[in-house]
Image (cartoon, helix red, strand yellow):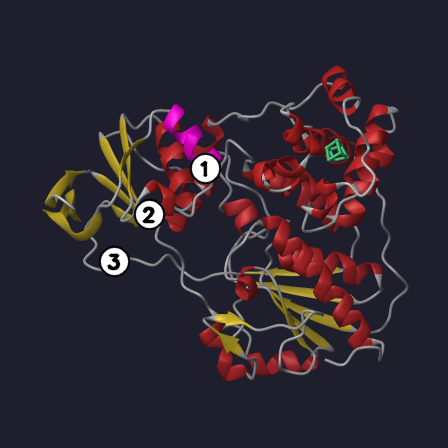
Amino acid sequence: MWKLPETRSETAFEDYKAPYDTQQALTEASRCLYCHDAPCIKACPTGIDIPNFIRKIATGNVKGSARTIFSSNILGASCARVCPVEVLCVGDCVYNAAGVPPIQIGRLQRYATDAAVEAGWRFFEAGPSSGKTVALIGAGPASLAAAHELRRQGHACVIFEKGQVPGGLNVTGVAPYKLRAEGAKAEMDWLLGIGGIDIRLGVEVGKDVSWDALQGYDAVFLGVGLGPDRLLGGELAGVHGAVAWIEKMKLGKVDLGAVREAIVLGGGNTAIDCVRELLGLGVPGVTMVYRRTEADMSGYAHEWEAARKYGAKVVWQAAPVAYVGDGAVRAVRCKTPAGEVDLPADLVLVAIGQAKLGDTLARLGVSVEGGRVVVDASGATSRKGWFAGGDLANGGKEVVNAVAEGKRAAAGIHAFLTGGGHA
Ligand code: SF4
């Protein structure tokens, strides 16, 4: 059984959306119109029956509500907090068009699912043993969702995880004001309560276990996510890849005591998360530096708006060309429309994306395009009996997408193992 370190920088953060108490949940649930053909359901990658679970909350059936949610999304508690609901279900709630505040679907989902995880309510049992065993590579949300579905069908599961903690970015990468690692762990422990999912931590396939050894399994699911942070080159002390830094902050301590000015390079959601995390951890000056304009940034507008409220500074249209410093970074030299400028920084986080791992897997006989493993509508790769999902196949999306793709692949694997598939 794995444990989280007790001293972690992320524990400085409180939830930025406080959980509902019963009265708040009942009040919000009673506002739902229980729309026929509800657009909020269509906006959810896992297709949660949102009006149904909200109606159950409204009638005091919290357990039934949680069952409805988890039936579609086995990481429904995490997703309740980490989903960008503003651009998914809440963004599509019919109330928006009427100029009325939309239903707070994520907070209601959290109300029901937190209750289930805390109480240990069990909704799903493992199916009778099929005698088949599936190897899943990587222990992130895609593999966990796939493994849970496979266990319901009676297939044994072995997950190989090269790191020391399971859960993937749901544990190591989510902004702690949305979900701290202990919250993700609690849901994962609950999920694993189905039994028969053997997670082997610290085991890297291709290094500690050969790829050939996977031939001993009846099917394989690839869910290894993305690779290391992309860097610019010429890094000095005080310059870190954003994803690696976030993991350190979530699973251990980061020392920011001497940092006066921090720069985050990038314009995506990881960059915005870093900005808020640095501000939340007490860094006096935090500036996001993005090479294009605000209109071009890939980060969500609502996240950026929140970061600005917390005091984030920004320099648009500034492309980094070099780090300045003698051993330790002192500034980032950037090319701007007004010429080159040195932006002072004693900490720099580089959030310009992560490597895609598909190319390293192409030699195993799976088709790869643009660094992503190509899958069909059942999650099958071009290699017979091998499936994939999550960031490895979609290039980097949300936890909810990984869950949806893990579920889809589990259905494909089950069909394959029972002779109904074509993979
Ligand atoms: Fe309820 Fe809004 Fe979904 Fe309609 S669209 S069912 S009002 S949450």
Question: Disc 3 designates what residue?
Answer: 232
Residue 36 or residue 263, whichever sits in front: 36
Q: Secondary structure at mark 3?
A: loop
Q: Residue furthest right?
A: 128
Q: Amino acid at mark 2?
A: Gly
Of the two numbered discs 1 and 3 on the same chain, state the one appearing first in sequence.
3
Question: Mainly helix, strand or loop, the magenta region?
Answer: helix
CA neighbours of label 3 inside 10 A, class few (<14), some (14 to 19), many (20+): few
3D distance between C-alphas at marks 1 and 3: 26 Å
Q: Earlier in the sequence, mark 3 or mark 2?
A: 3
Q: Is residue 245 left or right of residue 331?
A: right
- Tell me, yes or no, whether the highlighted magenta stretch contains residue 293: no
Q: Nearer the viewer, residue 351 or 116?
A: 351
Mark 3 touching mark 2, by CB under 8 A?
Answer: no
Amino acid type assigned to the residue bearing label 1 in the image? Ala
Q: Which residue is mark 1?
A: 301
Mark 2 and mark 1: Cα distance apart in space: 14 Å
Magenta residues?
301-309
Q: Do we see residue 259 in this rendering? A: no
- For disc 2, the neighbor class at 10 Å (few under 14, some 14 to 19, many from 20) is many
Q: In which quadrant of this rendering is ligand 1 seen?
A: top right
Q: Is residue 353 above or below residue 173?
A: below
Of marks 3 and 2, the one in the foreground: 2
Please tell me which of labels 2 and 1 falls first in the chain: 2
The picture places residue 184, in percent across and down from the top left corner, at 61, 41
Amino acid type at circle 3 is Leu
